[in-house]
Image: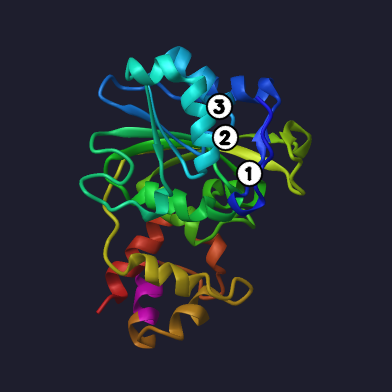
Amino acid sequence: MHYQAKKKFGQNFLKDKSFVYKIVQSIPNIHSDEKIIEIGVGLGDLSDELLKLYPIKAYEIDNDLCSLLRKKYGSMLDSKRFELINQDVLELKNSQGWLHDTPYILVSNLPYYVATHIILKALKDPLCKGFIVMTQKEVAQKFSATCGDSAFCALSVLTQTLGIAQYLFDVPNTAFDPMPKVTSAVFMVRKNQNMLKENFENMLKIAFSAPRKKLFKNLAAQYDKEKLHKAFEQLEIDKDIRAHQLETHLYHQIFELIKE
C-alpha cells in the first residue's frame, strides 16, 4: 500500500518488520478484561500483527489513511475484531476512561510531537492499565529513568508513582519511511496505582525547574523555607542534593510535610 506520509501528522511509518515483531512480543500478559488500543495506525504494520493475537480498537487522525484502512480491513471491521475511529485522541471527551470505557492497554508507535502529552494522559487515566509505546529516544529515557540517572525528571517520578517502567530497545531511524532525524525507542509501563495527589505534579515541576540547581533551592522559590528545612532534616535529606538524585518515595514524603 503506497501512501505519501504527511508532515503535519508527524507520520513516519515503521517499515522494518523485525521491530514490529519485537514490539508485539514485548506486550505483557493481557488480562481477559483488558482491551488493546492503538493510536496512529499508519499503514497498519503494527495492527496486522496485533490482530493475529487480539481484537483491537484503533484511532487514526488522518482521513485519507482511514479510507485506505477501511478497504484493507473490511472483513475485520465487519466482524468487529477491528474497530477504527477517525479522530484526534487529544480532542476526545473523557467519559469513563479516556480511550476506552473498560480497562485497556495502549500499544502504539506514537507521533513524536504529541507523544509526551499522550503518555501523560494514559498514565493518569484510571482505566489505562499500562502501555508499550515507541517514542523519540529522549522521551523514552525520561519516562523510564531511575533515580540518579541524568534523565531522571518529573516525568520519571510521575511514572514511578503510578507504575513500573521498563526501557526495552532502541529503533534506528533507518527502520522508518520517511526516515526521521532521530533515534526512537520502545518502553513499557505496567501501572499499579491510580492516585496522583492534587498539586503533587506541581511540586515536581518546581523541584525540577532548574536541574543544575540544588533541589532545596528550587523548592524554596515556592514553598515555606522553614517547613522545607524541617522536612529535609526529618527525612535526613542532604541540602546539597539535586533533583535527579532523590528517590520517588522521598518526593512523596517531602510533599506531605510541606503542602499547605
Measured as percent of width and height from the top left, residue 20 is found at: 61, 24
Q: Residue at the spot x=21%, y=49% of the render?
A: 95
Instruction: Tell whether label 3 touches label 2 (CB within 8 Å).
Output: yes
Q: Which mark is residue 42?
A: 2
Front one among 256 and 153: 153
Q: Quadrant of the C terminus?
A: bottom left
Q: Quadrant of residue 128?
A: top left
Q: Quadrant of residue 170?
A: top right
State the residue position of label 3. Answer: 44
Q: Earlier in the sequence, mark 1 or mark 2?
A: 1
Instruction: Tell whether label 2 touches label 1 (CB within 8 Å).
Output: yes
Q: Residue at the spot x=43%, y=49% of the render?
A: 88
Tag count in the figure? 3
| Amino acid type of the residue that numbered disc 2 sits on in the rendered structure | Gly
Q: Quadrant of residue 8?
A: bottom right
| Amino acid type of the residue that numbered disc 1 sits on in the rendered structure | Gln
Measured as percent of width and height from the top left, residue 220 is found at: 44, 84
* Residue 136 covered by magenta stretch: no
Question: Whole-Å distance between the Cαs marked 3 and 1?
Answer: 12 Å
